């Protein structure tokens, strides 16, 4: 069966971000559920105790992709 509905744009809003020097950051992983991100975060703390990681709920992904879709549609017209 072929799905007819569009997938959710922000299906993985939970992220683990590694804080780097000079106010830089790197997204390590994205997750759908908070429980999954907590478990992965604990593993990272054990494997890389000197690295700084932060859990973030990224709600802007949907807004960015919606704006990108609009701009692409405008260019096609």
Image: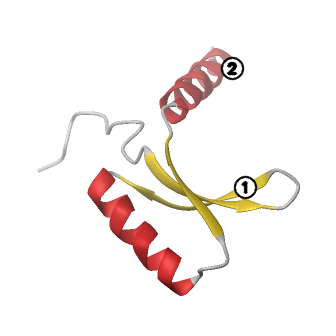
Q: In the depicted view, which residue is nearer to us: 67 or 5?
A: 67
Residue 19: x and y in percent read: 70, 59
C-alpha gap between disc 2 and disc 1: 32 Å
Q: Is residue 4 placed above or below 47 in the rendered structure?
A: above
Q: Residues within 10 Å of mark 2 (few under 14, many from 20)?
A: few
In the image, farthest residue toward the left: 1
- Nearest-to-viewer mark from 2 and 1: 1
Q: Residues within 10 Å of mark 1 (few under 14, many from 20)?
A: few
**Label 2 or label 1, whichever comes before in sequence order:** 1
Name the element at disc 1.
strand
Q: Residue at x 36, y 62 (%)?
A: 38
Q: Quadrant of the C terminus?
A: top right
Q: Which residue is mark 1?
A: 25
Q: Which mark is residue 60?
A: none
Q: Residue 52's spot in the image, x, y percent?
A: 65, 66
Residue 75 disc label: 2
Q: Is residue 44 above or below residue 29?
A: below
Q: Position of residue 49 (x, y in %)?
A: 59, 80
SS of the residue under disc 2: helix
On screen, residue 11 versus residue 50, left or right, reads: left
């Amino acid at each position: 069966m072929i799905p007819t509905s569009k997938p959710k744009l922000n299906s993985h809003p939970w992220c683990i971000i590694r804080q780097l020097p000079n106010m830089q950051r790197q997204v390590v992983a994205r997750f759908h559920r908070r429980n999954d991100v907590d478990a992965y975060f604990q593993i990272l703390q054990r494997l890389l105790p000197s690295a700084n990681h932060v859990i973030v709920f990224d709600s802007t992904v949907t807004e960015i992709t919606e704006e990108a879709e609009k701009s692409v549609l405008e260019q096609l017209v």
